[in-house]
Image (cartoon, coloured by chain):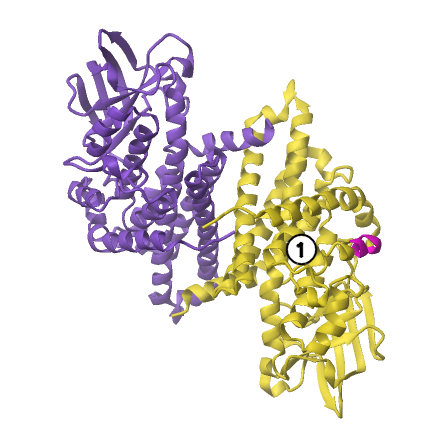
Amino acid sequence: MDWQLSDDQRMVVDMVRDFAANEVRPLAAHLDEAGQFPLDNLRKMAGLGLMGMNVPAEYGGSPVGAVALSLAISEMARACASTAITMSVTNMVAEAINAFGTEEQKRTFIPKIVGGDYPMGSFCLTEPNAGSDAASLAVRAVRDGDHWVLNGTKAFVSHGAYSSVLVVWARTSDAPKAAGVSAFIVERETPGLTVGKAEDKMGLRGSNTVALNFEDCRVPADQLLGEEGKGFRIAMMALDGGRIGVSSQAVGIGQAALDASVEYAKIREQFGKPIGRLEAIQWFIADMATELEAARNLTLRAAWLKEKGKKFSREASTAKLFATERLNVWTKNAVQIHGGYGYTKEYVVERLIRDAKVLTIYEGTSEIQRLVISRALLEE
Amino acid sequence: MDFMLNDEQNALRDMVRDFAENELKPNAAHWDEHHIFPAEVVKKMGALGLMGVAYDPAYNGAGMDYLCYAIVVEELSRGCAGTGVICSAHSSLACDPIYNYGNEAQKQKYLSRMTTAEWIGCFGLTEPGAGSDAAALKTTAVKDGDEYVLNGSKLFITNAVEAQVAVVFAQQDKEKGHRGISAFIVEKGTPGFSVGKVEDKLGIRASSTAELVFENCRIPAANLLGEEGQGFKIALSTLDGGRIGIAAQAVGIAQAALDEAVKYSKERVQFGKPIAKLQAIQWFIADMATEIEAARMLVHKAAWMKSHKMKGFGHYSAMAKLYAAEAAMRATTKAIQVHGGYGYVKEYSVERHFRDAKITEIYEGTSEVQRLVIAANLLRD
């Protein structure tokens, strides 16, 4: 066992921490209030190599490994949870294409995701009527010569209005559930693909979440990702990695909540002394710090297993369930420590509690994680 | 970075798991019911090196590290939490201070016999009026020629009845407060030293918990542990390590509760199917497993930090102990709920696990003391 970061991992952390402190944190409140997407910052992040941290350099990536990626997402989320999720999902999409794509697909599409004018990739699985039951998705893809023709609607697509490349799951046969699902690489500018409603969200307001409509959207046949009818597995494997991303994001938001709470507890005086001297406040802080450390350990272990090519699905679910559920307790208590001030936008905790909520929902709800975890124990 | 146990650690875990499965688990209910100290089993543990895991072979120790020790306590506790704490109190609280602060003669005489379980050790810090506020202890030590004279009593001492060796903390100079406290090694049979009231406890009933009484107990000056006035520091640093043992014990208890809950939920049929098919039960299982993993990783990291003498280890062991103890209480509560009425009776071991878990939130620093330690570290300027 060895819990120390390597020098390279430490360098990544330092680099992202500096960038986040200087470029991201100062903008976070504004992005939240205005619902603005930080395109300039995301381009700068691509320039720093943060959008393809687990894909080979020959496709424009900067492969530093899953652990460094996790650490980087946490550092970014500590400054701005919205920017962090855009980065996390983009890395996930680049990885999926790298893992399942043909050489041609990798050369064509990964560089667009990790660099270029719109250095983002989107993951289009969820539909209005297919959330946790993802295999019931209804978007159709019908073969027509050397194209596939896509019809239907995807919901809650992260940065769907901005991504240069999307991976879209669609039904290519009448085989039931997962068996009939294939994955496609679709470029944002493809005719027949339009951006629908942009969601007005409780939190993560600096991220873009949209519906995407496919109307006779013709996708070249060579953009099928993986094999026909085997797309669902790609989605599940990508989500396993994505869960580490969300868990890392939770650790970062949690650290921000702890930072703010410690700072406030030292300066806020009541009853003639800083409230940090009161056991009631100390208890909140001790529990937050302890559970945050546990969440960090679970997250880094899942990332490390992934990096080493070992099984990590259950560990990723464990990390995501724990980190995101506890995050919602930490951010609630962070607001409580701040009292009435914590309920106003002058203090960051007001944003953190809103940002935190979605983490127990996206990339597999807590309930889906519990299914994954209990199944592993009860069916062995 | 490496999150896997190595081959040696895996082999040790498997060995202790087998030992617990065969020697502890079948007897744990009996020991619990009759408050029996498993003397024969403890001897076997000594022979296997489990009573001196983290100590130098020069003193008959197994020469492994603190992570190995944590693994041992967890696996023992999975079979019998009482046996787990016999090992933990003996190792962390009695062997550790002698190993870390004892002189060569003390290590040769005491540690070499303790690591083989020939002699069992205990730790005398707590008093009737000094629990969480340990510095308020009232037992006195007065130097008299080449002896110290001890007077007072110690309460809630694990292994008190069986211990041949007690590490005892006493006040030499009240004016100096905690800087007046010194640590001493006291042998069973020393005139003036006796075991007082034996507690009848809610749980961990395979271990003894009793009072140590000192009435003009004269011990040789050579039995001072460390230096005069160093006692409180010895006590606190010892407890930093002890918390890893208790945290590991808590993880073992919680794991035992999860094992039983999984087994029962597959067998128990209600509404025409095993209750494991119900999401209500699956949720209990998933949450228990998740929290146990979180706790185990905190324990392993704390143990790894101690082994590598890393800064911040005391802070980390407080977090591990706080989290693991409270997670064990939650896990055992859920395990009983999974069992329904059957979980409330002694035919099912979750009834015992629940009682055993409770003490982990109390001894070697209550959850509240851990929170004080953790918050103080964070809020310090």
Q: Which residues are magenta?
A: B39-44
Task: Name the side, left or right, on which A51 lies relative to A314.
Answer: left
Q: Residue at x 72, y 69 (%)?
A: B111
Task: Give yes or no for residue B299 being in the magenta stretch.
Answer: no
Indicate the chain on which mark 1 is placed: B
Report the front residue among B376 and B341. Answer: B376
The three-letter amino acid code for the residue at tag 1 is: Ile
Q: List x then y, in percent, for residue B376.
A: 46, 66
Query: From the viewer's perspective, is residue A250 above or below residue A164?
Result: below
Mark 1 secondary-structure assignment: helix
Q: List x then y, in percent, for residue A1.
A: 52, 51
Q: Quadrant of residue A202?
A: top left
Q: Colour of chain A?
A: purple
Which chain did the renderer colour yellow? B
- Tag 1: Cα neighbours inside 10 Å, few (<14), some, or many (≥20)? some
Q: Is residue A134 visible?
A: no
Q: Which residue corresponds to mark 1?
A: B359
Report the front residue among A47 and B124. Answer: A47
Query: From the viewer's perspective, is residue B41 above or below residue B164?
Result: above
